[in-house]
């Protein structure tokens, strides 16, 4: 009885308490950095004068994106309403997936959803507060821009998607690349 209670408590800590703390930290990091770079942009115009952090690779430049990734639908009046509704639907789906991960004691899947949801909420806060998302980082490789201008919420979303791909490719019971030889893999399955 005592052992079962201890296992249940560890599961609650691992799959509820720590993820809530991580989720709050991700949103705080995203919102604080956006505020800092918004204020920094007001004193030094980062739109026209990007700051080179790593010359030829990483830059700080400021933009406010009214669309989605890479400015998609930024000129459409209905786009903000569309993105707000889409975000609400996505958050409900993420919550349902999280319950699934919790029931299966899948730590990697749970944390991937925490990162995806943290990034989604970070950008959602911008859409609600400003009607656009603040982006302030860019990267180049051999003189070609790798991505559009992005923020920490975008990085968290990307990390979460990579983690969930790893889960479904290597960890899930039906994963195509899961080790079948009985060795411990990346899944936790409630054992700590």
Image (cartoon, rainbow, N blue to C red):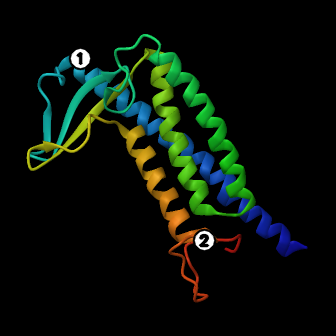
Q: Residue 130 is drawn in which quadrant?
A: top left
In this picture, is 111 found above or below 116?
Answer: below
- Mark before the other along the chain sequence, 2 or 1: 1
Q: Nearer the viewer, residue 161 or 44?
A: 161
Q: Nearer the viewer, residue 67 or 131?
A: 67
- Mark 1: secondary structure: helix
Q: Which residue is mark 1?
A: 42
Q: Which residue is mark 2?
A: 187
- Mark 2: secondary structure: loop
20 relative to 132 in the view: left or right: right
Marks 2 and 1, how far apart at CA:
47 Å
Q: Nearer the viewer, residue 162 or 42?
A: 162
Residue at position x 14%, y 34% from top? 51
55 relative to 139 in the view: left or right: left
Q: In which quadrant will I find the C terminus? A: bottom right
167 relative to 104 in the view: left or right: left
Residue 61 on image: x %, y %: 20, 30
Circle 2: is it few (<14), some (14-19), or many (20+) Cα within 10 Å? some
Mark number, residue 30: none
Residue 136 on image: x %, y %: 27, 32
Residue at position x 32%, y 26% from top? 71
Q: Residue furthest right?
A: 1
Residue 121 on image: x %, y %: 53, 33
In this picture, is 104 found above or below 124?
Answer: below
Q: Nearer the viewer, mark 2 or mark 1?
A: 2
Residue at position x 40%, y 19% from top? 132
Residue at position x 36%, y 33% from top? 69
């Amino acid at each position: 009885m005592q052992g079962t209670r201890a296992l249940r408590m560890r599961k609650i800590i691992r799959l509820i308490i720590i993820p809530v703390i991580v989720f709050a930290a991700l949103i705080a990091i995203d919102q604080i950095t956006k505020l800092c770079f918004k204020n920094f942009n007001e004193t030094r115009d980062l739109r026209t004068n990007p700051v080179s952090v790593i010359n030829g690779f990483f830059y700080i430049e400021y933009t406010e994106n009214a669309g989605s990734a890479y400015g998609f639908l930024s000129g459409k009046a209905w786009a903000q309403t569309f993105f707000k509704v889409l975000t609400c639907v996505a958050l409900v789906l993420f919550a349902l997936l999280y319950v699934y991960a919790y029931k299966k004691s899948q730590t990697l899947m749970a944390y991937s959803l925490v990162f995806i949801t943290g990034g989604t909420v970070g950008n959602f806060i911008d859409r609600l507060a400003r009607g656009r998302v603040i982006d302030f980082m860019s990267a180049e490789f051999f003189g070609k821009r790798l991505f559009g201008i992005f923020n920490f919420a975008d990085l968290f979303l990307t990390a979460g998607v990579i983690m969930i791909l790893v889960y479904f490719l290597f960890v899930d019971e039906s994963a195509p690349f899961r080790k079948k030889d009985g060795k411990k893999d990346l899944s936790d399955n409630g054992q700590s």
